[in-house]
Image: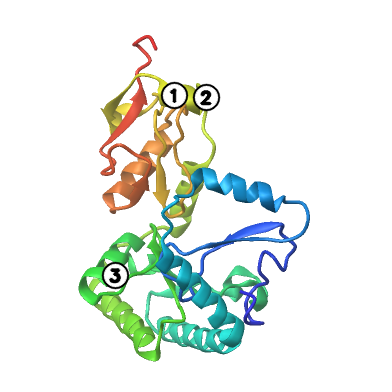
Amino acid sequence: LPFHPSLPISAMEAGADACVTSPHKTLSAFSQGSMLLVQGHRINADRLRSSLRFAQSTSRNFPILMSLDATRRQMALQGWAHMELTMALAARARAGLREIPGVSVIDAERLGLPASQFDATRLVIDTADLGLDGFTVERLLREEFAIAPEMSDLTGIVCLVTLGDTRASIDALVDAMSCIAKDFGGRGHLDNHEMNRSVGTAIAPGEMSMTPREAHFSRSCQTPLPMAVGRVSAELVVPYPPGIPVLVPGERISLAKLIYLAEISTHGAHCAGMADPTLLTLRIVDEETPR
């Protein structure tokens, strides 16, 4: 973000004491490469280093560390030029995608934001008007066109324009989306407003019947998804995206959240934290057996 004036200001420029940034996303660091940036006097750097040692391995992955340093040097010397090209490619992608009937791309104007407050390197592509959920579009892009979006949800996909992209890769995405719209679009209708409302209900805090610690260490059992309503969750259920828990240990499971989980599992959503990644069953607290 600090390397181009058309991008939003970074967390550090905004005055944050610390932030985690991921140069493996838009920039050229290896996957899993991230940095913890610290500034000012409110965070004790020595204590931070000591705390990190609790979680870090002593067997560091030096290729990743080397890629982070190489990326740091690359951006320090040529950052503006690289981001200028990346922003131009992002604009080319948006222009091409907007020409496809049924495909819309979220931008600053649609969100009512100044252009400088919107990260244009993220292509948020709404596919609801095609009658296709994002999970289906991602699967088609991966299997039929060898294109890997960053993520998908019920209403669309997110693709990243990075330093590794070229005009050829951008045009390949636009051509693939055009083919998908032509060959698979118009086979149904998705209510975008209804989907967004169901997501909001799903990630809203639920009724807690015990603490997460109590639920995690309680006796538990697997139960079919439809039978879990009204029971207490013994596990964390985190669909990605948005990466926000729908259920946490100790939460009493509501019908609305079960309906949402059943819907996204039908479309092939990925959930973290679950014993059963297929989402056919949930681990619940065995409330009838003494703990």
> Measuring 72% from the left and 51% from the top, which residue is drawn there?
43
Nearer to me, 275 or 287: 275
Instruction: Compute the Cα span from label 1 to label 3.
Output: 45 Å
Amino acid at circle 2: Thr
Residue underneath mark 1: 215
N-terminal of the two: label 1 or label 3? Answer: 3
Residue positioned most to the front: 58
Q: What is the x, y in percent for residue 170?
A: 38, 84
Mark 2 and 1 residues: CB-CB less than 8 Å, in contact? yes
Residue pointed to by mark 2:
211
| The image quarter in which residue 103 lies | bottom left
Q: Which numbered disc, 2 or 3, marks the residue that appears first in the sequence?
A: 3
Residue for point 39% across, 12% down: 291
Q: Residue at x 35, y 84 (%)?
A: 169
Q: Secondary structure at mark 2?
A: loop
Residue designated by label 3: 186
Location of residue 222 (image quadrant): top left
Residue 102 sits in quarter: bottom left
Decide if residue 120 is on the left or right side of residue 167: right
- Of all residues, the one furthest to the right in this rendering is 41
- Residue 155: x, y in percent? 41, 61
Q: Check disc 1 and report its element: helix, strand or loop.
A: helix
- Circle 1 Cα neighbour tier, 10 Å, few/some/many (<14 / 14–19 / ≥20): many
Figure quadrant of the N terminus: bottom right
Q: Mark 1 near mark 3, Cβ–Cβ under 8 Å?
A: no
Q: Residue at x 54, y 36 (%)?
A: 205
